[in-house]
């Protein structure tokens, strides 16, 4: 699995975003331990806090299909002027199924902007291991 396939999947998922309030469309695609790609997009709501992020939607799809590990994840959003990094809540949701070394590919419509690790995005994180 090369990064291009994951980035393309995130870019395509972004086109399905429902973001009438912010106008900020985001797509996410993740590769699980079974070699499957799961995608998601943000889905906003008139009651604003009820909107969900693209990463959250992709994780829900993975769990529904039996995946338990995020091997790599790509996020596509923005116009290239800034990095569309996962929000704090999504960093923690990714953490549930990933490690400090898991790569998070930050993309815009033109492609890859930055290749970060989850450990860099969420240092000293709390995860399932902490609960023993
Ligand atoms: N959003 C995501 O879906 N993922 C991110 O990584 C950053 C933000 C969404 C939430 C909201 O629908 C819109 O982008 C603006 O914050």
Image (cartoon, grey):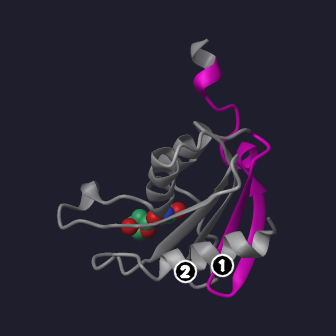
Q: Magenta stretch: give its range.
A: 100-129
Q: In this view, does 42 lie to the left or right of 118?
A: left
Quarter occupied by the C terminus: top right
Please tell me which residue is depicted at 18% across the width and 61% down the height of the picture: 47
- Magenta span has 8? no
Please tell me which residue is depicted at 70% across the width and 38% down the height of the picture: 123
Q: Does the residue labelled 1 lie within 8 Å of ligand 1?
A: no
Q: In this view, does 48 lie to the left or right of 19?
A: left
Q: Residue 109 location in percent, x, y?
A: 62, 85
Q: Residue 83 location in percent, x, y?
A: 64, 71
Q: Is residue 20 left or right of residue 122?
A: left
Mark 1 surroundings within 10 Å by alpha-carbon count, few (fewer than 14), some (14 through 19), many (20 or more): some
Q: Taking the image as four quarters, which one is ligand 1 found in?
A: bottom left
Mark 2 surroundings within 10 Å by alpha-carbon count, few (fewer than 14), some (14 through 19), many (20 or more): many
Query: Residue 91: which disc?
Result: none
Please tell me which residue is depicted at 27% across the width and 55% down the height of the picture: 49
Q: Is mark 2 on a helix, strand or loop?
A: helix
Query: Residue 12: which disc?
Result: 2
Q: Quadrant of residue 4?
A: bottom right
Q: Residue 97 location in percent, x, y?
A: 61, 39
Q: Residue 21 location in percent, x, y?
A: 28, 76
Please tell me which residue is depicted at 71% across the width and 82% down the height of the picture: 111
28 vs 22: above or below: above
Q: Which sits in the foreground, 104 or 87?
A: 104
Q: How many labels does the image show?
A: 2
Find disc 1 in the rendering and name its residue.
8
124 vs 1: above or below: above
Q: Is mark 1 on a helix, strand or loop?
A: helix
- Residue furthest left in the image: 47
Disc 2 vs disc 1: Cβ atoms closer than 8 Å?
yes
Quarter occupied by the N terminus: bottom right
- Magenta span has 125? yes
């Amino acid at each position: 699995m090369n990064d291009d396939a994951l980035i393309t999947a995130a870019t395509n998922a972004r086109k399905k975003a429902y973001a009438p309030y912010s106008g900020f469309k985001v797509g996410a695609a993740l590769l699980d331990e079974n070699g499957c790609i799961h995608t998601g997009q943000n889905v906003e709501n008139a009651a604003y806090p009820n909107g969900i992020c693209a990463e959250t939607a992709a994780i829900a799809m993975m769990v529904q299909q039996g995946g338990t590990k995020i091997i790599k994840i790509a996020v596509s959003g923005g116009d290239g002027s800034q990095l569309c990094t996962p929000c704090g809540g999504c960093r923690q949701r990714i953490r549930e199924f990933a490690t400090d070394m898991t790569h998070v590919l930050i993309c815009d419509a033109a492609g890859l902007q930055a290749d970060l690790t989850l450990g860099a995005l969420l240092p000293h994180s709390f995860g399932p291991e902490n609960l023993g």
